[in-house]
Image (spheres, grey):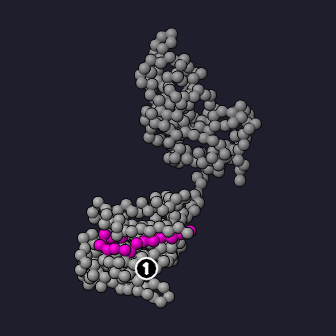
């Protein structure tokens, strides 16, 4: 640590002479109405410690140990406040800290391994008392060099008992909550066609003749997205763009449940087969019973009938070949289109949010 006038001291390996010189450089720290001198202090502009609180892990330790509930994930700021030197007969009477602003919630005191006796740190709250003897803890530690620390809330009473010999040197930090970032509400401008799309879908979805027993509406995507074999297409929900994002937003506004699925449409040889799947399927060039196609597609396949609102040909598609066998084997292809799928309940239970 450097302090005026251009002096330096290694607090992990200091001599009594080093600490006498440091004490002489301090100004009196007073307390109480009579302004009693209780220790020496150096304010922030008057010293430069080499001790880096950020590299010690103490910030995380303090958060985990001191905070709980909704506060245990909050970001905190540790601000160095002052250095204190307690020589023989120095002390600090019982008191509570005064928060420097509304975000300050506590203090952290780091005790350096300077030889001393006495100077125990005492905490009191709700009729309980805790005494911490850092002089003994540091001297008894098998890890050298080391420091002691204690963190506490601002409303906890604390004191430093009289130092009987040597010098007790501490750094005090103020602990603050970092205010959550305030976001400025952003009003987005809807696409020019969004209101018209909403009107058309509202008219369609409130028609009781549309899928009266419930079912799916499929909308082919109008933009390309990166997919490959095994891709769980639900993840595309968060990265839809352009017309696709507008459609999804309108469906949500109308109160319609929707998701992104792969539609494996009817092959001309098997017009009764249509499937929805959660992922891009690879049939692996294996033999497939054409009447058990859904089983071979694996978990997540659902045989469906769809009412197609737009052409189901999607800009995001996939293809997989397989050897179909029945009366005679043939090489077939499974074509999939990634789509927005709206899930409609039966018309008698269907509630569509009204147009505003």
Quarter of the rendering occupied by the N terminus: bottom left
Answer above or below: position of 33 versus 94: below
Where is residue 27 drawn, in percent x and y?
36, 86
* Camera sees residue 118: yes
Does residue 295 lie above or below 256 as drawn? above
**Residue 167, image quadrant:** bottom left
Q: Residue at x 52, y 47 (%)?
A: 238
Tell me the magenta residue range. Answer: 111-126
In terms of secondary structure, where does tag 1 sit? strand
**Is 220 left, or right, of 42 in this rendering?**
right
Q: For mark 1, what is the residue?
A: 92
Looking at this view, is 278 or 331 the one in front?
Answer: 278
Picture residue at 59% right of the left edge, 60% below the top: 187
**Nearer-the-camera pick, 76 or 87:** 87
Residue 136's spot in the image, x, y percent?
34, 67
Using the image as rendered, state which of residue 210 and residue 196 is in the foreground.
Answer: 210
Count of number-bearing discs? 1
Asked whether, in this view, residue 68 is left or right of residue 7, the answer is: right
Q: Tell me which residue sits at (51%, 64%) in the image.
A: 181
Residue 263 in the image: state x and y as whole percent. 54, 32
Magenta span contains residue 118: yes
């Amino acid at each position: 640590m450097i302090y005026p006038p251009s002096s330096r001291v290694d607090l992990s390996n200091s001599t009594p002479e080093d600490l006498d010189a440091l004490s002489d450089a301090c100004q009196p720290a007073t307390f109480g109405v009579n302004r009693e001198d209780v220790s020496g202090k150096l304010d922030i502009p008057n010293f430069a410690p080499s001790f880096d609180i950020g590299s010690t892990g103490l910030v995380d330790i303090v958060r985990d140990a001191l905070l709980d509930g909704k506060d245990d994930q909050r970001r905190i700021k540790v601000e160095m406040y002052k250095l204190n030197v307690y020589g023989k007969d120095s002390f600090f009477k019982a008191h509570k800290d005064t928060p420097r602003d509304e975000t300050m919630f506590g203090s952290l005191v780091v005790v350096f391994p300077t030889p001393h006796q006495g100077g125990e740190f005492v905490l009191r709250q709700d009729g309980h008392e805790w005494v911490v003897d850092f002089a003994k803890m540091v001297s008894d530690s098998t890890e050298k060099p080391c420091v002691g620390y204690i963190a506490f809330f601002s409303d906890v009473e604390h004191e430093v008992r009289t130092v009987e010999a040597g010098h007790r040197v501490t750094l005090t930090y103020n602990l603050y909550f970092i205010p959550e970032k305030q976001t400025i509400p952003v009003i987005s401008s809807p696409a020019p066609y969004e209101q018209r799309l909403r009107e058309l879908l509202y008219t369609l979805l409130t028609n009781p003749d549309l899928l009266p027993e419930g079912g799916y509406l499929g909308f082919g995507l109008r933009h390309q997205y990166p997919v490959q074999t095994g891709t769980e297409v639900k993840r595309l929900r968060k990265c839809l763009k352009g017309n696709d994002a507008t459609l999804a937003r309108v469906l949500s506004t109308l109160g319609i449940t929707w998701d992104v699925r792969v539609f494996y449409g009817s092959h001309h040889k098997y017009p009764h087969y249509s499937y929805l799947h959660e992922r891009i399927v690879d049939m692996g060039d294996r033999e497939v019973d054409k009447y058990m196609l859904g089983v071979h597609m694996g978990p997540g396949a659902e045989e469906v009938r769809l009412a197609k609102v737009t052409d189901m040909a999607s800009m995001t598609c996939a293809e997989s070949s397989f050897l179909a066998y029945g009366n005679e084997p043939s090489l077939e292809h499974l074509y999939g289109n990634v789509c927005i799928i709206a899930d409609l309940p039966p018309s008698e239970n269907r509630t569509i949010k009204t147009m505003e």
